[in-house]
Each structure stands twice: as C-alpha cells, then as structure tokens.
Image (cartoon, rainbow, N blue to C red):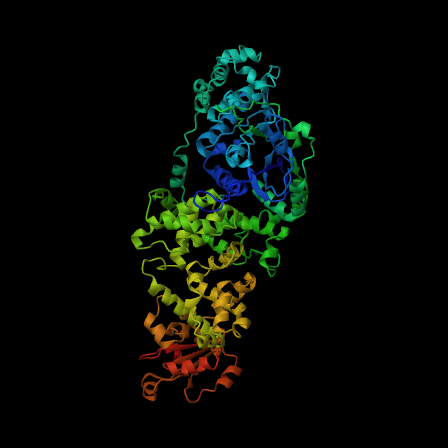
C-alpha cells in the first residue's frame, strides 16, 4: 500500500491582544488572556465542525483546521499582523515589536490545485453549500471571502478556507484589532467599509463578487472598495465594475442581481440564492437528531475511509518532526514595515467633544503564496517505509497480535514513539469503527495503552456509553437557574486553570452545562452538588470539548460505576465504608505501614477523602490523570482503592520515618508521583487480592469497623483452594474453630490448627494468602507481626464440600 496525500498543511500565526490596565474582571477574578479565549473558541467551533462530518455532507466544502498552538515568546511573527488605519503616532507605536506578547498558530488544511473556473455550477454549488453549512449549522460568518479563500482539492471539490478566523478571534477582538480584512480588500462588502460588524449577508456580497471575478476576470474592481459606496442598486454595481452578465443564463443574472445589492437589507440570503440556482436547500435542522435516532450505535467520530486521515497525519507529523513544527512558529516576520501598510484606509472618527478617538486597526491576512506550509511529504515518505499491514490491521483474525512493538517502555515514551503510535492509531480506528461488535477486542487493546488521538471514543466505549445516553443530555434542562449555580460559578474558575481549555470562557461554560445537566439528570436519585464534582468532570470535558453530550454521558457512567452514593446529600455512611475498605486494603498488603500510621493516629479520613471523591483529579495534574484513568476505567469499583495504596507505597520510605505533623504536611502537597509505577503496582496488588476483601456493599460498616481486619467470603476461599494450577498451595488456612465444631462439620483440607500454626514455616512455603477461620484476635495478632495478606473467614455451620478433608 502506498500512502499519498493531495492536501498540504498550512499555518497562520496571530498575535493575541494584551489585557492592559485592568488585571481582574467585574467578578474579581483574573482576566482571561486572549490566547486562552481563542483556544477555547477553536476547540468549541472547529472540533464541533469536524464532529459534524458524519451527519452533514456539506462539511466537506470547508477546509479542516487541525490545531491551535499557543506560543508565549514575544515579538511580532509570521502570518497576519495588526495594521494601523492611518500613520498616527499611536499607529507607529503599534508597529514597534513588543516583548512577551502571546501568539497563536493556526494549522489547517490547504490545497494548491487550480480552481475549476470553467464549471460555474460546481463552483457556485460547492461554495454556497459550504457557506450554508457555516451560517446555519456552525452558526458563524466567514467575513474574508476573496478568490484566495477558495481552494480546490484536485478532484473538482471546491472548499472555503480561512472560514474560522472570525469565529476564533471573536471578529478580531482577541487580536486587539477592530476588524480582520483579507489581503485583497477589493471584495469587502459595502457595510464593512463603515466599520459595521460583518454579518451573514456580508458573505453573500463577497462570494458573489468573487464568483463574478473568477468567471469574468476582466472586470474592473477598484483597489479602494469605497468607490462602490455611491451605487444605489446591483445594476449600478455591475456597471461600475464593467461586468456583463447579459450573456449568462437567466438564473445567474438573477443570482448576481440579488447578491450584489449594496444595502444588506435588500441583499439575498444563502438560502434564497440556492433556490435561485435550483440547488436543493439542505434540510439539516433536524437531520442530526434523525440520524442519531436511526443509528443503532453511538457516534464513533471515525468517518474517513482513507487509509490514514488528515488528523492522523498531523498527529503523527507532530511526533515525527516536533522541532520542525516549532521552527515554523519561531520564524520572524521579515517584511519591511512599508509593505505592511494596508490598502484600505479609513479616516479617524471624531467625537462631539473634539477629541480624537483611538484610531482603528486591522488584521490583514497574508496572501496564499506566503502561507507557511509544513513539509508533510517527509512524513509520507516515512509512512511508506512502514509495513503495509500496519495500515490494514486484521483485528478480528484469530491470533491477532495487538502490539508488535514492546510495550514495556514508560507510557510517556510510547506516546511519543512514531512507529508505535502509528500502529496503535490504526488498530484503534478499526476497532472503534467496528464497535460495539469489536468491544471485546477494544477492551483487550486498551489494557496495553490507549493512543491519545482516540482516547475520547475509547473511554466512551469502555464506559459502555450508548446513543440514548447522548440523547439524555440534549433533553435535560441546563439553563434554568438553581441553588447550586453560585457554588458552581465559584468552583469552576479555580478548577485546573493551568489547562488552556478549562481556563477559557468556552471551557467555563461547557463545564457548567455538563455539571448542571448531571445534577438535573440525577436529582431523582438524591444526588446533589459537592465540591470536587467539577474536578471529576474536568477530564471528560477536556477530551470531549467538541462533544458535550459525550462528556456528560461518560461523566454520568463514571460516577455511577465508581462513586455510587458519594454525592448524596448525606453521604457519610458511603464515605465511611469506602475509607474502611481502604484501611483494610492497606492492612492486607502492607501491615507494617498500617501499624505505623495507626500508631500516629493518622487515619485515611485525614487525607483520602479528596482522593476518592474526585478520583485523584484534585491531587494529580490532568496529564497524569489521563494515563491513570486509562487503566482505572478498565477496573471495577474497588480498583481506585489500589491506586490509593500505590500512592502510599511510593511515599512509604518517607512515611515510615514521619511524625503526625510530617504526614499532615506531605499530604497537603503530594510529591511527584510516578504514574507508570503507580499503575503497575496497583494492578499487581489488585490481582493478588480476593474480590470480597475490597468489595463495596458486601460487609456491614459496623462489622468492618468492629473486626478491624480484612474479611473474605467463603466463595473466594473455595475458588482459590480448588484452582487446577496448584495455587491452593499458596493459601494457608488457620482453622480456629472449637473442636466440637470441627468434629461436627468436618475438617478443612490442609488446614493448620491454632496451636500448630508456625508462621515461619508457613512463610518459607511461599504462601500467597493466610485465611484465619473464626478468630479475629489471631488475625489481628498476625497483622501486628507484619504478616501480609491476612484475612478473616467467618464460617458458621457446615464447611463447603470443596474444602472438606477427604
């Protein structure tokens, strides 16, 4: 198989506005940097558009945006620059490079193929449908349509590019400019010349004038578009530009007469223009919901049938050539200042007091021939050197090996290994496309690791999220004010604000909606808002930033699986049970540490509540949470207890020498945790623990506190003692029943009696588990002597036949 791509990957670098003067907003919180707001807009608008591609065929008429990279290094740089509207002293200062100014690099799909100007129908149909999708599905305006904003993929599919700039920058506000203008200002609409905010009908004017210029390249467009201001109607506009449309078909004449009206109120809409050209108007208002209702499975977001998608190409490019991508961000803008003067100049406005208002500035895009292109051809060469079966994994073939590279390296290294990630991405894409029928294979592959590119979909399938769960989010009320709104508004601005997405206004809004939806959805179950719920929802919002319904569904499934009862109004009994089980797990695997902490009276109540209430999101950074939860989601509701045990194990050497005050200090700010070691140790101890020892809801809370030792169910003892792999030799049973009960109910096979038990002999036999029958004191005695994996079996009445001595 030969990998070939027809697209290019281009970059534009934007300078972000600086919050001057006020450091805090009206709510007393720090002002959100413009770069953070733009990143939130990017993920919200762009990724949401990418997600619509399965539901809306018109998405293909817009180019794809791939990434938005924040760069804090100062000075003006490549791409678009803020330009003054007139040569005033303040404008001169705006041209002076300022240090420590944040910049944002947009990376997007681009094409170099010629536009098919010979086919008017294709040209108009594709651009109008792309504009329709932009206006009515995405809900934003283009504002930068010129011939440079139209590209062709080489297969006669025309696409609109630069369509997201106004949405990302909030019409230029986040770039400290009054307006974003294209490099070729001749196509600016009538209303933009007066500084009026660009609207949908502004795109209609620019598109019509662009199409006219493409099919009649000899028309006379003035470099100063204000020359058309004096025109009263579209006929005068056509005369002014010396365009002859009389030889065009009647529908095209009507099209241009409707679209080139100087006044926006008289100008046709995209829907009206589609009807004029006899192009069926898409009925997409309910199409997405209808498709969801008809679909038997949830949205997998893997729709591209190419061997490798553009998003996969870019992800692998970042792994293969990270330094090259960074170099493209660092390049300085080399043009002489004289060449940055805009061709559109507006006079400064005057107010009634006679003082000059701050001059307007514009953000001017670079021409297409000056766009920086990433050298993805080098990546394609490297991809073609890989075995062909990497791109077509036979995931359902018996004996399929999910990993042909060694997974023994740390997860951080594996996630940055090009060959390994390429293999994993191809496997997971095939498995996600085949879900839910391939769910078993998906879970098996996820036990090794999960590629970050497909983590959102993989988590959703692990949590068994269905389309009905997604639909529940659309139905629930997320807008009505509630009593918890104030507390949520206080907590969210403090929730992982080092993350760009969560720190953005879009992030605050999305997290708020997900929390309000969860509270409303679960209010009949008695769940209420507790502090920490925002941290718990944050990872799902981050990885599903473009898909709130999936973030909600995953969050809801996660809380029901691992934190059932934790968010009740009275959750004391649930938390006390969980902490009691945690104490038991510590005593079971590390009685020496448990004895030391008990001697200090440093109980889990003092440090472990925020661990489990937030599933460690309150104490670990988000990048570690992603790796931790990749494994945690595959375990049962008891597995988090072993994560907590593993964290204690990494701190064990310190804790064994600490006093009570030392413990308080170290747990107030946890040291760096090695997540790879943490996960491996947790899995090892989880597999070495009988299920009933840490099972929620099996033992009464009073019994857990009274016995103060691990309890085991007889079914687990039977299972361990009767395994065919001779593992029964690893189980030591100390039968402490009275002699009359032994005579009445029978002897337990290979059991020690109370007086016969020799701990040293038992230890030398390499036993795995010590089970004490009906004697709490003996169990406590063994744990006091630091004997590991001791548990109590309360046996009343007859002995199971599987345990009876023959």
**Residue drawn at (36%, 67%), measured in percent from left and top?**
577
Rendered position, 329 above or below 136:
below
Residue plotted at (60% across, 14% down)? 220
What number of labels is visible?
Answer: 0
566 sits left or right of 506 in the view: left
Q: Residue at x 37, y 73 (%)?
A: 713
Residue extending farthest front: 353
Residue 210's spot in the image, x, y percent?
Answer: 56, 21
Percent of width and height locating residue 228: 54, 15
In this rendered view, identify the residue nearer to me: 74 or 80. Answer: 74
Q: Is the N terminus in the top left, top right, bottom left or bottom right quadrant?
A: top right
Q: Say which of 587 and 272 sits in front.
A: 587
Residue 185 seen in this snapshot: yes
- Outermost residue to the left: 524
Q: Say which quadrant the C terminus sits in.
A: bottom left
Depicted 657 relative to depicted 467: above or below? below
Using the rendered view, name the quadrant where residue 266 is placed.
top left
Image coordinates of residue 731 in percent, x first then y, are 46, 78
Percent x, y for residue 129? 49, 27
């Amino acid at each position: 198989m030969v990998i070939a791509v027809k697209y290019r990957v281009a970059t534009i670098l934007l300078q972000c506005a600086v919050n001057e003067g006020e450091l805090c907003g009206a709510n007393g919180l720090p002002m959100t940097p413009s770069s953070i707001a733009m990143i939130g807009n990017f993920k919200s608008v762009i990724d949401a558009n990418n997600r619509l591609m399965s539901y809306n065929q018109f998405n293909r008429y817009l180019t794809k945006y791939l990434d938005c990279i924040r760069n804090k290094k100062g000075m003006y740089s490549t791409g678009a620059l803020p330009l003054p509207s007139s040569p005033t002293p303040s404008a001169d200062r705006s041209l002076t490079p300022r240090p420590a100014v944040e910049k944002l690099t947009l990376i997007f799909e681009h094409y170099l193929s010629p536009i098919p100007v010979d086919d008017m129908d294709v040209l108009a149909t594709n651009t109008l449908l792309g504009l329709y999708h932009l206006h009515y599905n995405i809900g934003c305006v283009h504002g930068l349509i010129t011939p440079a904003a139209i590209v062709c993929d080489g297969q006669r599919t025309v696409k609109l590019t630069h369509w997201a700039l106004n949405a990302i920058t909030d019409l230029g506000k986040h770039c400290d400019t009054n307006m974003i203008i294209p490099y070729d200002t001749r196509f600016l609409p009538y209303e933009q010349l007066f500084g009026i905010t660009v609207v949908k009908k502004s795109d209609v004017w620019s598109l019509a004038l662009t199409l006219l210029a493409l099919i009649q390249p000899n028309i006379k467009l003035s470099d100063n578009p204000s020359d058309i201001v004096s025109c009263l109607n579209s006929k005068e506009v056509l005369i002014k530009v010396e365009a002859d449309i009389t030889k065009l078909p009647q529908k095209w004449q009507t099209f241009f007469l409707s679209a080139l009206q100087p006044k926006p109120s008289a100008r046709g809409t995209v829907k009206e223009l589609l009807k004029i050209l006899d192009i069926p108007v898409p009925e997409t208002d309910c199409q997405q919901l209808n498709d969801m209702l008809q679909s038997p499975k949830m949205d997998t977001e893997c729709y591209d049938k190419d061997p490798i998608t553009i998003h996969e190409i870019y992800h692998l490019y970042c792994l293969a050539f990270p330094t090259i991508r960074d170099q493209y961000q660092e390049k300085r803008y080399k043009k002489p200042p004289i060449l940055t003067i805009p061709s559109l100049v507006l006079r400064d406005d005057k107010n009634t007091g006679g003082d000059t208002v701050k001059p307007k500035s514009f953000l001017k895009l670079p021409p297409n021939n000056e766009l920086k292109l990433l050298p993805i051809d080098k990546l394609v060469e490297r991809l073609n050197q890989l075995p062909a079966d990497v791109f077509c994994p036979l995931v359902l073939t018996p004996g399929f090996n999910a990993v042909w590279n060694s997974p023994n390296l740390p997860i951080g290294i594996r996630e940055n290994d090009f060959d390994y990630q390429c293999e994993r991405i191809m496997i997971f894409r095939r498995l996600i496309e085949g879900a839910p029928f391939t769910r078993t294979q998906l879970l098996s592959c996820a036990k090794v690791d999960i590629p970050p590119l497909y983590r959102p979909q993989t988590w959703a399938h692990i949590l068994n999220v269905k389309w009905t769960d997604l639909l529940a989010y659309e139905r629930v009320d997320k807008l009505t004010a509630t009593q918890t709104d104030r507390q949520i508004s206080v907590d969210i601005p403090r929730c992982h604000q080092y993350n760009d997405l969560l720190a953005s206004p879009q992030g605050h809004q999305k997290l708020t909606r997900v929390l309000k939806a969860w509270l409303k959805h679960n209010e009949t179950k008695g769940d209420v808002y507790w502090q920490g719920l925002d941290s718990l929802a944050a990872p799902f919002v981050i990885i599903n930033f473009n898909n709130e319904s999936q973030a909600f569904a995953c969050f809801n499934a996660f809380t029901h699986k691992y934190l059932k009862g934790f968010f009740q109004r009275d959750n004391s009994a649930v938390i006390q049970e969980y902490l009691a089980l945690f104490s038991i797990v510590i005593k079971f695997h590390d009685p020496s540490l448990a004895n030391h902490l008990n001697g200090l009276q440093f109980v889990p109540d003092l440090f472990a509540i925020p661990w489990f209430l937030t599933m460690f999101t309150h104490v670990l950074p988000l990048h570690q949470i992603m790796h931790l939860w990749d494994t945690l989601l595959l375990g049962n509701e008891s597995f988090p207890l072993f994560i907590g045990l593993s964290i204690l194990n990494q701190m064990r050497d310190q804790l064994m020498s600490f006093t009570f005050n030392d413990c308080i200090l170290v747990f107030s700010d946890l040291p760096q945790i090695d997540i790879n070691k943490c996960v491996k140790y947790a899995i090892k101890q989880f597999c070495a623990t009988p299920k009933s020892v840490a099972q929620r809801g099996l033992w009464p809370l009073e019994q857990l506190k009274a016995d103060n030792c691990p309890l085991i169910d007889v079914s687990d003892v039977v299972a361990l003692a009767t395994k065919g792999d001779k593992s029964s030799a690893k189980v030591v049973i100390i039968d402490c029943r009275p002699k009359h009960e032994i005579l009445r109910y029978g002897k337990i096979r290979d059991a020690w009696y109370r007086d016969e038990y020799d701990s040293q002999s038992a230890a030398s036999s390499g036993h795995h588990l010590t089970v004490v029958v009906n004697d709490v004191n003996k169990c406590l005695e063994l744990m006091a002597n630091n004997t590991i994996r001791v548990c109590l079996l309360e046996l009343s009445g007859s002995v199971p036949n599987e345990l009876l001595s023959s």
